Structures are given as C-alpha cells and as structure tokens.
Image (cartoon, helix red, strand yellow):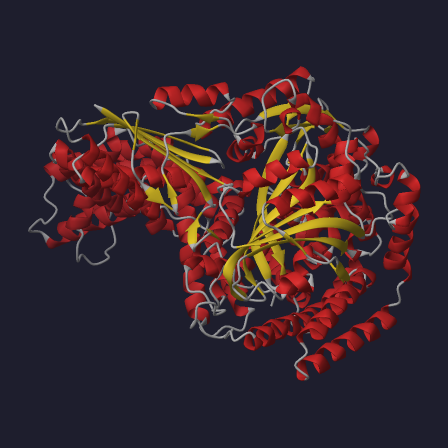
Amino acid sequence: MPPATVEQILHRLASFWEERGSGLLPPCELPVGFGLAAPEVFLSLFDGRARTTHQLVAVHRPVDARYGRSSLRMTRHLRFQLVRQPVSAGVRHEVLDSFRAAGFELDRRDVRFVEGTTSRPEIGVRGRHQRVLIDGLPVARMVFVERAAGVRLPLSCLEVSYGIERLASVQQGHADLFRIDWGGGHATARSEAEGSSAWMEEERSRYLLEVADVELLRSQLESFDQQASRCLEAGLVLPAYESALRSLQVLEVLKLRSLPLLADHDLLFGRIRRRVERCVQLRARRQGLDPDTRSGAHALGVADDPDDRQLELTAEER
Amino acid sequence: MSELLVEVRGDGFPALEIERATRALKDALVAQLREVGMPARQSATGCSTQRLMVLLRGIPEGRPGNDEGRRRSVGEALQQALGAVRWRTNVSWGDGHRFGAPVSGLLALLDGRLVPARCFGIEATDTTRGPASLGSRVFRPRDGDEYGRFLVRQGVEVRLAARAARLERATHELAEGLGLSVVPSDLPVRWAASCETPSVIACRLEDTDLDLPAEIVAACLAERQGALPLRAPDGGLAAHFVAIVDRDDEHAERAAVGNERAARDHLEDARFHWRRDARTPLAKRIRLLSEGDDTQETLYARRARRLEVLCTLIARELGSSEHLDASVQAAGLLYADRQTETVREFPRLAGVIGGLLARDEGYPASVWHAVYDSGAAGQLPRSRAGEILYVADRVDRVVEVLAEEEPRVGESRGEAADELARSVVDTVHRAGLELDLALAIAQAVRQRVLDDPSRTLSEALKVVDRAMRGLLRERGAHDAEIDAVLMASGTSSIPSVFRRVSGLQGLRLDGRLTDLAANARRLRDVLLESREVELDPELLEEPAERELHQTWIGYEARIRQSLDEGRFDRWLDAMAVLDQALQRFLGNVLVHDANEALQRNRLALLQELQRAYAGPLRLVELHATSTKTARSGQRAASRPAAASG
C-alpha cells in the first residue's frame, strides 16, 4: 500500500470512527494548547451524556517554539481528536485498528504503549495516559480523564489525540515534517498554503522567543481577563471561556519572554484557572446540575474514594 | 487434582503495579477457594500491562457429578477475588466499573472447562488472545500448559522476572558486541513491565548529537526516549544507545531508524533548553529568587539562607574552617538551578545542572563540585565542602518535611523524612564525619518558625535514629548489638557507632564475649548500691585480688586504646585476660569481708574494673538482650510445626 497523505489519513481516521458511532464536531477555531480544551468538547464534559465525537484541532503551543528545528516541538500542529464518554473496554484494540485503517501495516512495525500521567492544570484535568509510539516515534496519546475543572466527571472520559503531521511523517518516511505530502500531489505548495511550512514556524518562533513585547503581553492578558470577568458577570459562559483560553495563550508567551522567571506566574495562572472553573459551574447550573453537591444522577460532586486524593490539585495547579 | 487458570486482560494495566496486583489476585483467589473447601497446593502468576494471569494447581477434586457446582463456586470466588485487588490509581469505564485499566477479557478455566463468572460487566470465556499490537490472535487453551505454549509461540514470556532477566542479558550482549558497556539503570526492569514481547535493538547517534553534558544526554535518552545510553571504554558516553521494541522478530530492527530520529529530536530539544539556561548567570538567578512573595522561588531563596548558617555550624563542628567559604558559597547557589528549563524538563538533574552552570561560569572546583554532588544520586560528595553542604541540605529538608502541616499526596511524610535521614546518616558514615547530628538538627529547627519546635526536634532525632538502625541492620547487625552500642555512646559520632557495631559483629561467634557479659552482670549486682571509694593497693591481701589488680594495671591502657581505635578484636583479647583474673577473684575472694576496710578496698577494685566492663559497649545490656533474644528464639523453635506454618 503506498504511504498515505495527510488528507488520506484524516479521511480514513474520520471514516473509521464514524463507523463506530462518532459524530464530527466543527474544527476548533480558538488557540488551544490541547484538544480537550476546545469549547465544543470541554464545556460538554460535565452534562453526563454518553457521546463519541471527533474534531480537527490546530494546537497552539508557544512553549514549543524551536525555530522549526525539532519535529517533536512545533508551535502549531494538527491533531485529530477523539473524545468518548464513558470510556469503553477494549479501546486499545480499537486504537490499534484505527492505525491499521489509516494505512499502517502494524505487523511490520513496532508499536509501544508508554504510560504516564497527564496534567493540564489550566483546565484542571489530570488523568492517566498511554502514549502510542510507532517505531519509537510518538504519534498519538490516549488519556483517561476522571476529573476536569477540579470536579469529578459524571461519566469517565477517554481522549485519543493523533498527531497528524507526525503520523504522516512516519508513514511517508520523512524525518522533516515540512516535507510531508499533504495530498493532491502538490506537497510543497499545499504545505505552505496550510500554514505549516518551515519559514512560518521559524518566524513564529522568532516572534515568541525574541520579539514579543512583555508590556504589551501584560496588557493583552489584562484585557482578556477583564473580558472574561465581564462575561461571567453577564452569565455568558462561552465568551468567558474563550477569553480565558486567549488569556492562557498570552500567559504562555509572557512566560516564554520573561526569562528566566515570571515572578507572578502562579498568581496570573490561578486567576485564569478560577475563571475556567466558574465557567463550568455556570454551565452546570444552567443545565440543572449542581456542581457543589453529589445529589442527582449527574451531579458534579467532590468524589470520596481514595483515587480522588491522588487527583487532588497539586500546589502548582492551585 | 484440579487446575484453575485465570487471565484478566485489560487496556494497559499500570506497569509498576502489575506484579503486586497479580500477587494480590492470586492470594485473594487462594483464600476464597480455601473458604469453599478447595485449597490449592501450587500457584504460579504471570503479568504484563495487557494481562494478569494466575494458575492454581493441586486443588482437590470434588464428588463425582458435582462439577457444575464446583465451577459455580470458583466463579463466585473469582468475582470476590477481583473485587479485592487494589490499585493506586483506578480507571473508570462503562457503567461505573473501576479497576487498574478497563477490563476487556476474562479467561477462567477449571480443568479445561469454562467457569461461569461475570466481572466488570463481561462474561468469562474459554479463550485468550495474543498481543494486541501483533493482531490479537484468539486461542482456546485446554489447560495451563497449553496456554503457556500458545503465549510462547506468540513471543510472550508471561513471567515478569524472566522477561526482565532476558532483557538485562540481551542488553549486555548487545553492548559487548559493540565493544561498549551499559550505564547502570533500572530501565530493563521497566521495559519488562511495560512490554509483553520485548527485545532490544542497537541505535546510533552522530557525534555532533553528543555536544551536550553527558548527564543531560543520558537523562534525555532515558527519560524522553526510554532508551539506555552506553558507555565507551574511556568512560564517556558512546554514540550508541539501546532501545526497546515490543516485538521479537525480524521486523524489530526496522524500529532503529525511528528511535534514532526521535532521540535526535529529544536531544535537540534538550540543547535548546541548555543554551537558554546558560544565558542567565547564576548570580542573576539568585537575585531573582529573592524577589516576590511566597512563591516557590522565594522559598528556595530562604532555604539557601538557612543552608548558609547550617554549613557554617557544621564546618565549625568538624573543625573544617578551610572549607567553610566554599560550602557557604555553594549553599547560596544550590537552588539557583530550580527554575532553569533543563531542570524543569529533567527534575532529577536538580543540583547537577547548577553545578555544571557554575563550572561553566568559572566558579572554583570546590564550589561547583559541592553543588553538583548535592544532586548526584548515590555517590559520596567528592570534597569536604560538598559533604558539609549535602548534610546541611538533607538535615534542613528532614526538618521541613516533619514540620509540614498539610498531608502529602503519594509518598507519606514519614517515608520522605526517612529517605532523607537515611541519606544523611549514610553520607556522614561513609565520609567519616565526626559530627553530632543532633546539633545540626537543633539548628535547623531553630531557623524555622514552628508551632511546636520541640516536637519537630524530637521527631527528627527519632527519624535519624531509625535511619541509623536501618542502615546497621542492612549491614547484618543484630538489634542487641545496635542497642548495646547506642545505649553506651549515643549518636554523637555516627562513624564511631558504625565502627563499634561492626567490631561487635566480628565477635559474635566468640564464646569469650558471653563470659564477659555474664561477669559484667555479676559485677553490676555486686556493686549495686555501693558508694564510690578509693583503692588502696596496700590493702590487697589475697593472691587472687593482687593478681586482678596487677592484670588491670597491665591491661588498662591497652583496653582503652583498642576501644578508642574501634579494634574490638584486640579489646576482647585484653578483656578476656582480665576476665579470667576476675573469674578467679570472684571464686576465691570474699568481697563482703567482715573487715570493713578490706571490703571497701575490694569494692573499690571492682568499681575500677566496672568502668572497663560497662565501658562504651554496655555489656550488661548486650547480655540481657542476647539472653532475651535467645529465649524467644527457643520459644519459637518449641512451637508446634503446624502453628508456625
């Protein structure tokens, strides 16, 4: 079988999961650092409804600015994101089958699962994960999420996120992510049109690591935070959450530019985190759920089993 | 006899817990079966992140015609046993099931026949599956042997220890084939836990990939790529590493290219952080640490100030004033690397990175060595300044942990304090530091604002005592020996305690020690309630008392000197001569003579001797404890075999 293009991989993954009942969500338009934070997904995690959805997310990670010299670290890359609630047994087999569907001949490749702990303190998510390595290269990640925004989820959640460029580079045998074939036989042109070419990554890195102005960033951060606060006062969950996400992105850049230390990082971070938690609480109340008690079938409760102690917020998260 | 085969398959059980969980499952299953009159005589377990396997054999056969009832009982026992398995972290799935990972399959066979059981919402079946990544072939085994043969054909060694040993061997063979050696690591054990069909492959780097400090390259390969760095014959890192693959066939080697590419990218990333870190001088980092309110960084700054005071105290106690400046300067630098990007990426390099940055900035070797060695695990600091700093830092952290008010997540407060105290005691002992740790701990307590400083001090001293006893026990010392030494000399000199206990251990099989201890006790009894009196040699009349006095005069200096030097063999030789003279004295001379002057004089002679007997070893205590231990040993030995079993 010839190596698949990015376009084919996306299409095959979508078809594979659609056959298993997954519904397509619109692409995430906001600058998020990981797919689970996408508003369409995150704000729905707490309603207690079973679902499987997939979505294309352009992940923005200022901290990964490396001038395009590392294929493991990019300021922007594409992820195919699957979210399932509740988690189902046998998911490892399904994920392996999805790789086969995407064109990987797994009987000739090495597949390893490496476990670890995922911590996304920005949105209060912690859970166990398994990174999937094909021939030693990380290409996807399965995360078992038990809590988000500081509360226990009514239904357990599985997030599977595939690094699309990385999958294509492994399949096509290109070490250089900027040379992968996106489809249609116009590799280079298409690549630039999609915004993933080397010069763009280099310029973004230069902006993030050398040029971005600290004072301007601080002022941006304040603006977004004030907007989030106003929206919360007005009971507008989605705009408040979107402003909080934008604040997070600015804070990431500010941290990067405040070498070696952003002294008030914890303070700023904690403020954004509280906005996110407030968004979840408002949304839950609007759906008739009580985030502070354990009454009701889908209440967002403070869990009382021993595992939850392990998932309590760390000092850093607080 | 019947055989029960159970296999629980899941979507990735936590690798570090599978062995314990499988044992717990086996124990619970054996206990449940015993309760229903089906005790198992033999058991075997196997595990991977994909399966937990228990095989029980030697289960008595039931009455003919009762097979179905037995299988039902086994099914119920299995359900109970699975409910008894605990994991540190669970995963939830489906309708609220919780276990180490979602359970996707359950095999349960009693004598080859399906056991009816329903656990985690799934029914038990009579089939197993091969490794998920290799196609997950389905197989129906008839018994445990056939099950084992199927897994072997699939490349699965289900016994974790055998898997680890195989990988360890293969890693060394691979390294030797390249003319290199393996950097000591627990990676093969972790590989064995996380892979079901593991094998190792050799991978290459370019020499230019290694233009980073070797510590960073090694940490990067191990922690980011899960790969094992190799050492060149000259001791430096080689441009090769060993990677793990989860398949053991002709396709395994193909993964080398991907592993090399990933390793290069990880190293490029580490290089990026290291270069950025080098742009900010340590002095600036220290200044920044002192700014701000109550952040983690200011806590580091405060700790550095406390360490400066502690280093001063320790250096003075050790009479090492020439190392004072270096240790104090290193104390100020010690936590400066905590907000470097490299340490954030590789926390276990904390201290090491500070040392390397200090070296590159031109700090004296005594200073950067001290900082570096404080973070280097398992090795003794290479300078006196380093030893001083290491001890000061760990003592401060012991007190910090014990003073914490909030409970810890994961590792308990006690465990953390014990671990730190152990490193302090071990370093003081190995470095031969004549330091009274109680003084350093008291200073560390004084430097903090605590609600109950005396409680913290007392806890810290107990933790140190526990650490010392633990280390001595690991060296084979008996509690009686440790007690004898500690009760006599306390903990003011740890090297001396270790020397004395070790010397005492050497005498363990020497019967003269028992005689010595018995006479020490007799001396104590004779001198009970006697007042201190002065000896008059002119009043010694009997030959046996004159002989005892002469022996004492002749051997006193030798006894004291051998004790000071910790030469217990010489000490025992001298004491044995004295002991024989004492034995003759006690047999031939009446101590409580009617003549009061003679009686006082004899008591005075024995009082002088008692100082030698009681001495730093407290023989009376040793004797008492040894006798108690021996008696309890006799009691245990006399218990009926069934009860002790």
Residue in front for this viewpoint, A116 or B277: A116
Q: Where is residue B291 in the image (x, y as percent from the top left)?
A: 74, 71
Q: In the rendered picture of this protein, how many numbered marks are placed on residues? A: 0
Q: Please give the name of the residue rendered at 83% of the width and 75% of the height, measured from the top-left corner.
A: A219
Compared to residue B115, the image places residue A32 above or below, namely: below
Image side of residue B63 versus residue B182, left or right = left
Q: Please give the name of the residue rendered at 40% of the width and 44% of the height, measured from the top-left corner.
A: B470
Whether residue B231 is visible here, answered yes or no, is no
Q: Where is residue B570 in the image (x, y as percent from the top left)?
A: 37, 31
Whether residue A92 is visible here, answered yes or no, is yes
The residue furthest top is B177
Compared to residue B295, the image places residue B22 above or below, namely: above
Q: Please give the name of the residue rendered at 51% of the width and 55% of the height, measured from the top-left corner.
A: A86
Q: Please give the name of the residue rendered at 50% of the width and 69% of the height, measured from the top-left corner.
A: A300
Image side of residue B430 versus residue B20, left or right = right
Q: Position of residue A139 (x, y in %)?
A: 69, 41
Residue in front for this viewpoint, B68 or A125: B68
Tell me the quarter of the picture where residue B308 sits: bottom right
Compared to residue B448, the image places residue A22 above or below, namely: above
Q: Position of residue B187 (x, y in %)?
A: 58, 34
